[in-house]
Image (spheres, helix red, strand yellow):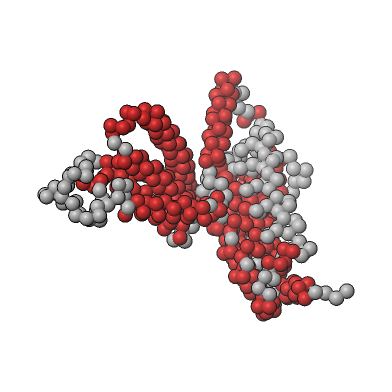
Amino acid sequence: MERRPTEENIIRLYTAAMEGDADTLERLIQNDQCILNKVSLTSFSETPLHISSLLGHLDFTVTILRRNSKMAMELDAMNRSPLHLACAEGHTETVKALLGANNDVCLIRDQDGRVPLHLAAMRGRVEIIKQLVSERPESTSMVLDGDTVLHLCVKYNHLEALKLLVSFACHDDELLRVNEDGNTILHLAAILKQLETIKYLLSVFGVKAGVNTLNKMGYTALDVLEHSLCQDFSSLEIRKLLMEAAAIRAMDPNNLQPKPTIAAIVSRSKVSTAKTWFRKFNKYLEYKGDWIEETRGSLMIVATVIATMTFQVGINPPGGVWQQNTTSSSEGSFCSSDNVCRAGTSVFSYNPGISYYRFLTFNSIAFVSSISVILLLVSGFPLKNKLCMWLLTLAMCVTISFAALTYLASLEMVNPYQQWDNYVYMYYIQRRTIEIWVALLIVVGAIYTTHFLSWSAKKLRGGLRCMLQRFRQKQQQTSSPRGQDINI
């Protein structure tokens, strides 16, 4: 059966991906501008980008990403992205190119629940781990079957990768997190008898402080070592290291702690419940995915419409403008020979009171806020940044609020006060509408401001903990030689 030209080009495309032939790719694209889009119509589960990423063909990968960057998010039959394959194979430059196209793929799990960072940790790809964490730091908190990336580094015995990830951990809690068996990374290193890993972990302040943490079985790291079936020379060395770090055996009668009272258990339960609810609330307040990117077009339209409305109302205010210079007050104005109402100026601007100036203030704020939103959207700032998202949300709230206030100020101007008493029902509805709007605005503003302050406090606290941890490590390193001299 004779193949059609499109099928032949697709086969040539996949062959070029296998060979990394970027010149052939360029020729195919010149002959058919949509050839990369037609890949999704084929029966192949992998895209050419999957193949070039797996084999590390950098030029071919860059060419595809330049022509069709969305292909970086395509998944194969195993739910793996091109970034998964490049990380597993250790193609550093290819990983850098894929991250430049879209770093959201760092958070995508494959069929086995692995994100790219998991594969890099399992293979010990230090440079790739550095790139992934710098692009999406939150990927370090994603677990695989209960194991953190630190557990994976220990389980697959990649000490350099473990050191790098520990340097990124700013909280001691991250170093003492447990897997499904309740084991910390120190427990796991003791079970696997990784002497060099244990030496390093005990030099880390956060790990050493939790050397006697219990797992689900109620064992410390020293306990799991003692219960090991095979005792060899490395076991003796590890036991010595743990004992020097003040490790104890939880099963030793001398170390048994008094049982907690019922009041202590109830108090601990209340604290735990409060923490759980706080975490759920904080998680609910978190920005969800790329909603800001998805609604960028809608926000642009809304901001543009409000800017147009406020601009139009500004140059053509309610009541119109004077068509010619007027000095007579016969038309209900306050014009006089001393107060000439000039042609082209607003009629209401010559009336006493603050209604017109209130209207002008509200309208001007709404206009400036709306064009500020437009500026933020077209400026190219990273909208996924929490600060930019908070500023954009605040600007939109201000824009909509003052657009509503402009409407109310216009009603005051064009409806005489004497007539408001005749429309009691309308006044009641307007008042209740304002109250509901203010309440809704306060709730939205409070939620986003609370989340922003919480995120800022977390970042500040994390930075301070990092500085304190580094200071303690430096103190420990400078004091250790003296301790050795004294022991000698």
Q: Residue at x 30, y 50 (%)?
A: 320
Q: Residue at x 60, y 52 (%)?
A: 139
Q: Depth check: 327 or 397 in front?
A: 327
Give coordinates of residue 483: x percent, y percent.
50, 49
Would residue 363 be seen by someone viewing this image from the given angle? yes
Left or right placement of residue 457 versus residue 339 in this view: right
Q: Depth check: 263 or 137 in front?
A: 137
Q: Quadrant of residue 433?
A: top left
Give coordinates of residue 42: x percent, y percent.
76, 65
Give coordinates of residue 431: x percent, y percent.
38, 31
Give coordinates of residue 383: x percent, y percent.
49, 55
Left or right placement of residue 373 versus residue 146 in this view: left
Would residue 465 be seen by someone viewing this image from the given angle? no
Q: Depth check: 397 or 167 in front?
A: 397
Q: Depth check: 290 or 228 in front?
A: 290
Q: Residue at x 76, y 73 (%)?
A: 6
Q: Residue at x 35, y 51 (%)?
A: 313
In the image, residue 408 above or below residue 380: above
Furthest residue in direction right, as rendered: 1
Furthest residue in direction left, as rendered: 338
Left or right placement of residue 202 versus residue 36 in this view: left
Task: Point out the image quarter for the N terminus.
Answer: bottom right
Furthest residue in direction front, as rendered: 330
Please give the count of numbered marks on the rendered protein: 0
In the image, residue 6 above or below residue 353: below
Furthest residue in direction top, as rendered: 262
